[in-house]
Amino acid sequence: MRIKVLFFGLLKDICGSAEDSLDLPEGSATGTVFEHYATRFPKLRAMAASIVLARNHEFAGVTELLTDGDEVALLPPVSGGAFIHEIRDPEGHFFALTRAPLDAKATETDLLQSCDGAVVTFQGVVRNNTKGRATLRLEYECYEAMAIRKMAEIGRRIASQYAISRIAMLHRLGNMEIGEASVIVVVTSPHRRAAFDAALEGINQLKKLVPVWKKEFFEDGEVWVEGEWDDNAPRAAGV
């Protein structure tokens, strides 16, 4: 059977490509895919504790069996024009990936209803330094099909746990300059406490569960920023 394999962020640089095809015998598991590339690229094995596997846009343990035509992605730790992908729920929750500048005010207006007494917006913006090292710009990429699904899952879960009206999560991709917003989380609710708590939970979960990666550019080089997966995300180290 033939498997499509995707690499993101730092792993794309290590393996020398963003995509590959792999022929495997019937009965192979996701861990077999990681083992194949870890043998070819030993640096992957050293990173196994922080690499997460996904099969057909869902997190996958190393023992999950594969079938012909499956798509397996090797994901490094998450960092963190028109919409590339968007999901709008009947309740008004909204999730999107875009390469255009983010418009927080427009999103607030879109979500706000007459029953709401609070709107809380978090914006993650590009700063001009990292630990004193001058940053020129950032570049974001993501596993798009999986990222938009995970954003929607997180938002819906938060909406069910907090007394809020609506939630929106938008992430920008591509190149960003200093001062530009890379991500926004907007929450509307009848009361402020629920809106504050839900917005904080939203950005915290997005940073650990949505496969988005950040590259920082400096005058003397560039580097993929290593973040941290959620504790429950299945690691390649299980091989």
Image (tube, grey):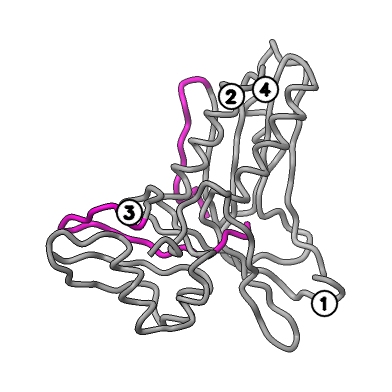
Q: Which residue is mark 4?
A: 112
Location of residue 163 with respect to 153 vertically, above or below: above
Give the residue type that dot 3 points to: Arg
Residue type, mark 2 in image:
Ala
| Real-space Cα separation, disc 3 to disc 4, in angstroms | 36 Å
Give the label, 1 or 4, closer to the camera: 1
Residue drawn at x 73%, y 89% as measured from the top left: 220
Residue at mark 1 to residue at mark 4: CA–CA distance: 38 Å
User: Is disc 3 surrounded by few (<14), some (14 to 19) or many (20+) residues within 10 Å?
Assistant: many
Residue identified by numbered label 2: 159
Span of residues in magenta: 62-91
Q: Is residue 53 left or right of residue 102?
A: left
Label 3 close to label 1 by CB (< 8 Å): no
Name the N-terminal-most of marks 4 and 2. Answer: 4
Residue type at the position of mark 1:
Ala
Q: Residue furthest front?
A: 238
| Residue 147 % position (x, y) | 47, 49
Q: Amino acid at mark 4?
A: Leu
- Secondary structure beneath dot 3 equals strand
Mark 4 or 2, closer to the camera: 2
Q: CA distance from mark 3 to mark 1?
A: 38 Å
Q: Which secondary structure class fits the magenta region best?
A: loop
**Which quadrant of the figure contains the N terminus?**
bottom left
| Image-based side of 77 in relation to 115, left or right | left
Could you tell me residue 194's position as x and y percent?
74, 22
Q: Which residue is mark 1?
A: 134
Which residue occupies the foreground of this view, 197 or 48?
48
